[in-house]
Image: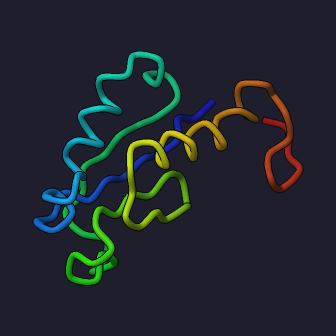
Amino acid sequence: MEPIKVRVCVGTNCCFAGGESIIEALEDDADLAGFVKVEAIRCLDKTCAGGAESPVVTVGERLIKRATLEVVMEEIERQALPLILGAPDEEGRDA
C-alpha cells in the first residue's frame, strides 16, 4: 500500500493561517505513520488567493482550501479506509 500524499502549503499566508500546525499535528500522530506522507510545500500556484483561502492542503488529489486539521483528517480517513479494508477504490480497482 502506497501512503497517501498530504501536501501542506507553508507559504506566508498559509503558514500564519494554520498550515504549520496542521503539519505538526499530522507528523505527531503515530497512527498515521504508515498511511500518509506529509510534505511541506511553499505554494500551490497562488491557490490561497492572497490568503483568503488559506491554508491550502492537498490530500491525494483532493485540494482543500481553508483547511482545518479536522477536515484534513476526515479526508485522510476517507481515502485510507478502502486501502485498509482492501475494498475497491473509487475507480473499482481492488486496493
Farthest residue, direction top? 30
Q: Is residue 89 above or below residue 54?
A: above
In the image, taking residue 45 as reference, residue 36 lies left or right, namely right
Which colour assignment does the render follow? Answer: rainbow
| Quarter of the figure that contains the N terminus | top right
Asked whether 48 or 86 is in front, the reply is 48
In the image, taking residue 49 as reference, residue 95 lies left or right, namely right
Residue lying at 39% horizontally and 57% vertically, measured from the top left: 67
Q: Is residue 22 above or below residue 64?
A: above
| Quarter of the figure that contains the C terminus | top right
Asked whether 14 or 35 is in front, the reply is 14
Residue lying at 83% horizontally and 56% vertically, measured from the top left: 91
In the image, taking residue 1 as reference, residue 20 lies left or right, namely left
Q: Residue 87: name its quadrant.
A: top right
Please provide percent x and percent y for residue 6.
42, 47
Please provide percent x and percent y for residue 76.
55, 41
Farthest residue, direction right? 92
Residue lying at 30% horizontally and 32% vertically, measured from the top left: 25
Residue lying at 79% horizontally and 25% vertically, measured from the top left: 85
Asked whether 48 or 95 is in front, the reply is 48
**Number of marks present in the image shown:** 0
Please provide percent x and percent y for residue 28.
29, 23
Q: Residue 80: name its quadrant.
A: top right
